[in-house]
Structures are given as C-alpha cells and as structure tokens.
Image (tube, grey):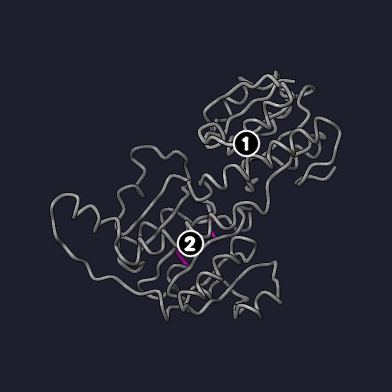
Amino acid sequence: MKILLTTTSFQDTPGSHHDLLASRGYEIVRERGPLSEARMLELAGGFDAFLCGDDAITRAVLEKSLPRLKVLAKYGIGLDKIDLASATELNIPVTFCPGVNHTTVAEHTFALLLALCRNLVEEANFVRNGQWKRITGHELHGKTIGIVGLGRIGKEVAKRAAAFGMTVLGYGNHWDESFALEHAVTRIADPDDLFRRCDVVSLHTMLTDRTRHLVNAQRLSLAKPGLLLVNCARGELVETAALLDALRSGHLGGYAADVMDEEPPPPDHPLLTAPRTVITPHIGSRTYENVVRQASMAVQNLINVLEGKPALAQANLL
C-alpha cells in the first residue's frame, strides 16, 4: 500500500502516531501541505490512501485518483476542502477526527481573545524593543460573549467563558438544551441579534454555502462599537473587505483569528497589516497532546478502512 501524507503537524511532531503508521509497512510519500489542486492532480493516481490536512481534494483530484484510491483519511475535522459529495458518489470513504481537538482549540480561542483585549502582542514587542509603554486594556469579566456554533469546541469555549465571569449567548442549528441549562447558555435565534447584544463574538461553526460570509458588512454594522471578533473556525466565514472596513473605521474593536481566507496568505494580504488584529498560522489544534490524539485517530481510520473494518468516524457513510 502506498500512502500520501501531507499534514505537516503530523510529520513535525514526535509521538506514537508515527509508530502506528509504520506498523503496517506502508510506503509513505511525504509532502508539505496544504497542497493546491494543481499539485494534488500531479500526485493523484499513484496512491491507495491520502492522509491529508487542508489540501484541495476536488472532484478532478478524486476522479484521477481512481481506481486505486481506497480511502481519504482527513487529519482534523474540517471537511470544506474536500468535495464530499463527489467522494460519496465515487464510493471513496472519507474519514475524519471529531472529538479530539476541542480542548486545544478552546484554549487557543482564549489565548487569542486575551491577547486582543489586553494588547499582549503590542506590549510584549514594546518591552522587547526597550520601551516601557503601557496600553490600557479591557477585562473579560462581566462582558457578553456570543458563540456561533455550539458543538464540541463551542461548548468548551462556553465553559471557559463562564469561568471568566462572562455572560454566554449561543447561536447554532444543533442545540444541546441540557448543556445550555447546566452552563447558563442563552440561545439566540437570530445571528443579527447576537451581534447587537455581544461584546465578543467567537466563531466555531463549519464552513458551508450557508455560513460563508456569515460575518458581513450588514451584520458588522449592527454590532456594538468596539466588538471583539474571534475566529478559530474558517477564514471564509468572514467577508474580508467588510472586516477591513470595520477595523479601519474603528467600529470593530479587534479581530483575532487562527485562520484566513487564503492559507498561507500572500505577503500583501491586507489583513496582515490591518489595525487591531492578532493572527496566528492555523495552530489552534497544534499542541503535542492533540497532534498525537488527532494523528492516531486519522491513522487508525486509514488502517481500518484499508483492512476492511469500520472507521472510527466516517463523514460519508456509504
């Protein structure tokens, strides 16, 4: 069996996942993803399985990969870079890793939020450069946070927000009423209302045709002046032009994100120099603890399908 491995955090992080993958004697070809559709098309056709991250897995890539490709094992939970409908139609199992990274991403969400509201990046850089310059920040205690998407990650963010003394509002299609009651999360039916009421909005929903540009000019215009927006989901949830306008005008108090609409971004991407932003390079799930968990699940999914066993989690149950 010949496996294409593209995820860099898998490759760069030591741990038992490497032993698990090596235990089956597969031939492993390593690439540094995320790979473009053009590069995937160059590689497609010569592999029994993809162990992939956020590579462009289009219908053209899938069609060229047949008849040899037997499984597409996603390292992670986001499936928006995979043409899942085409994979299902072509009878290619797509596995993924739900339930492994919620703690790590929730912690990173608060790292970004704290960096934003306490100006930590600017302050640390001032001191490093020999300047004892102090900026007045804001507390989280007593503020209202709106969580878009109350899945596993959103729930962990809600727990941490409550520990900070924040009022927690939630918006999303999938609602766990017992969790909401236990953790005092108020359900908001309309995202417009969420933006009107919140001091912080944190995005934790999947990217779909319906959620693309969920945060747009109209919705930002409804927000309280000084709203802090955090995005640890997908860059395309936010309309970049509208975001830039709101940041430059000062209406939006700040934007902290672990994702962008282009990854990696070109050097002239306007968000890289926008005011009041803190952006990290998609490392929300990249901890030593979580990489091993996530990679081990991805590898076990791959092994199971190749050996004719049920995957631990399959996105397109055939």
Let me know if residue 217 is in the magenta part.
yes
**111 in relation to 197, above or below:** above
Instruction: Answer left or right for 85 relative to 78.
Output: right
- C-alpha gap between disc 2 and disc 1: 43 Å
Look at the numbered disc 2 and give the secondary structure of its residue: loop
Let me know if residue 85 is in the magenta part.
no
Using the rendered view, name the quadrant where residue 226 is placed.
Answer: bottom left
Tell me the residue at 83%/30% (across/down). Answer: 307
Q: Which residue is mark 2?
A: 216
Which of the labelled discs sits on residue 16, or is there none?
1
Q: Earlier in the sequence, mark 2 or mark 1?
A: 1
Query: Local crowd at mark 1 within 10 Å, few (<14), some, or many (≥20)?
Result: few
**76 in relation to 186, above or below:** above
Amino acid at pointer 1: Ser
Q: Which callout, 2 or 1, points to the residue nearer the camera?
A: 1
Using the rendered view, name the quadrant where residue 149 is placed.
Answer: bottom right
Tell me the residue at 36%/66% (across/down). Answer: 252
Q: Picture coordinates of residue 313 (x, y %)?
A: 76, 47
Q: Picture coordinates of residue 16 (x, y %)?
A: 62, 36
Query: Local crowd at mark 2 within 10 Å, few (<14), some, or many (≥20)?
Result: some
Specify the segment rendered in magenta: 213-218
Tell me the residue at 70%/67% (across/down). Answer: 174
Q: Picture coordinates of residue 74 (x, y %)?
A: 66, 39
